[in-house]
């Protein structure tokens, strides 16, 4: 399953001001960055900053307001002209230099100093869609001082089984007419491609399991080629209908604050990413569900990923120890641990 714009149209798409309005109206997103920058105000004092993918320039302005002596606002699209106007409107033309360029081409731009801090809002759907993180890592390797900071500095991808009533229940009764057959066909088609929609927290069937953890100070672009792939076993937190898998991300800033796109948090423009099962399965509280999920960068379009989700039999998958599910082997293991609290290791085959 894959989704995304063509590489050729990527920068062009960001010349639509409605795209920027959508992001700026995303209060959890924008306030998270502003609060993190201002919470670290002393780290910005008289420092040199690079804003990668500056867009309309709001993060660059935040950095200047926090005391940065110089901000390189790097923006590849023609919206860079708008960013320059924003900079002048806020009287930071002596501090913020807007450079219309891809990060990959900055080596051809003279007089770019080493920077103390990199700031970037690079995240896409399911975290890595759009492939902008590669540009941030390139900027890190070429321009960030050895002891420099990155905002955000960590990223995590989570997954959880869920119900999807908007895709299942809608077709049950339309003005007294049953259309479940249409719903089944819709779900078959949607199961071929990830969906971007808002998942209600009450529709989650478990807490999130971390699928990917990235340290932006050390991760490499080659490590982004393939993400995930470990077998995941999750005990359901309640009775329900297992209808899909919900995916979201969070990022952490150097002040340890967090921006999360979890259904448990305020809705962002990223919403959540969902993979739909064409058929639902009744599950009970503590019943385990198992699956394998991985993301592989598309060969033809490096800004998108192909996503593969495989349903597994919980009987055939190794469970965490201790596991809170209702399977006999896990109940026995928990009992053994309770009886032997000083036991530091235990055989996985118990």
Image (cartoon, grey):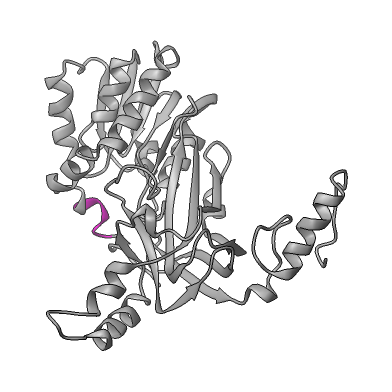
Q: Which residues are magenta?
A: 8-12
Can you see residue 285? yes
Name the one closer to the observer, 309 or 139. 309
Secondary structure of the magenta portion, mostly? helix
Determine whether, in the image, residue 20 is placed left or right of residue 59: left
Quarter of the C terminus within the rendering: bottom right
Task: Name the spot of residue 16 as percent of width and height, x first.
Answer: 14, 49
Depicted 25 relative to depicted 241: above or below: above
Quadrant into which the N terminus falls: bottom left
Q: Is residue 230 visible?
A: no
Q: Tell me where residue 236 appears, x and y as whole percent.
A: 54, 62
Q: Total number of numbered labels?
A: 0
Magenta segment includes 76:
no
Residue at far bottom of view: 181
Please tell me which residue is depicted at 79% across the width and 63% down the height of the picture. 332
| Residue 286 occupies quadrant | bottom right
Closest to the observer, 223 or 287: 287
Picture layout, residue 151 above or below residue 187: above
The residue shown at (32%, 26%) is: 34
Quarter of the view holding residue 314: bottom right
Asked if residue 209 is positioned above or below residue 190 in the image, the reply reads: above
Answer left or right for 72 relative to 287: left
**Residue 264, image x, y percentages:** 39, 46
State left or right for residue 324 relative to residue 261: right
The vertical placement of 235 against 217, above or below, is: below
Residue at 26% x, 55% y: name it. Answer: 10
Q: In the rendering, at what x and y percent does residue 78 appear?
A: 17, 43
- Pick the residue in front: 197 or 10: 197
In the image, 57 versus 323, the foreground residue is: 323
């Amino acid at each position: 399953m894959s989704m995304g714009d063509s590489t050729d149209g990527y920068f062009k798409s960001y010349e639509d001001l409605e795209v920027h309005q959508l992001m700026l109206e995303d209060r959890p997103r924008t306030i998270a960055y502003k609060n993190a920058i201002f919470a670290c105000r002393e780290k910005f004092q008289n420092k040199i900053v690079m804003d990668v993918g500056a867009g309309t320039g709001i993060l660059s302005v935040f950095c200047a307001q926090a005391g940065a002596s110089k901000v390189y606002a790097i923006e590849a699209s023609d919206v860079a002209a708008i960013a320059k106007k924003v900079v002048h409107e806020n009287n930071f033309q002596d501090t913020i230099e807007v450079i219309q360029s891809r990060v990959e081409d900055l080596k051809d731009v003279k007089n770019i100093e080493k920077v103390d801090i990199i700031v970037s809002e690079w995240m896409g759907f399911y975290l890595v869609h759009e492939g902008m993180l590669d540009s941030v890592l390139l900027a890190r390797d070429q321009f960030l001082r050895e002891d420099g900071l990155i905002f955000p500095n960590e990223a995590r991808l989570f997954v959880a089984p869920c119900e999807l009533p908007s895709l299942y229940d809608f077709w049950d009764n339309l003005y007294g007419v049953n259309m479940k057959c249409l719903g089944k066909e819709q779900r078959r088609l949607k199961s071929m491609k990830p969906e971007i929609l808002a998942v209600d927290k009450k529709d989650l069937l478990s807490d999130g399991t971390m699928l990917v953890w990235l340290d932006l100070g050390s991760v490499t672009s080659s490590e982004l080629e393939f993400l995930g792939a470990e077998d995941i076993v999750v005990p359901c937190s309640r009775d329900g209908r297992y209808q899909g898998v919900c995916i979201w991300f969070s990022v952490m800033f150097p002040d340890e604050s967090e921006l999360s796109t979890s259904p448990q948090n305020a809705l962002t423009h990223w919403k959540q990413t969902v993979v739909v099962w064409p058929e639902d399965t009744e599950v009970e509280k503590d019943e385990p569900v198992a699956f394998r999920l991985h993301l592989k960068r598309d060969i033809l379009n490096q800004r998108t990923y192909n996503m593969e989700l495989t349903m597994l039999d919980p009987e055939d998958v190794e469970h965490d120890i201790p596991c809170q599910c209702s399977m006999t082997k896990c109940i026995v293991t928990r009992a053994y641990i309770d009886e032997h609290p000083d036991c530091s290791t235990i055989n996985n085959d118990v």
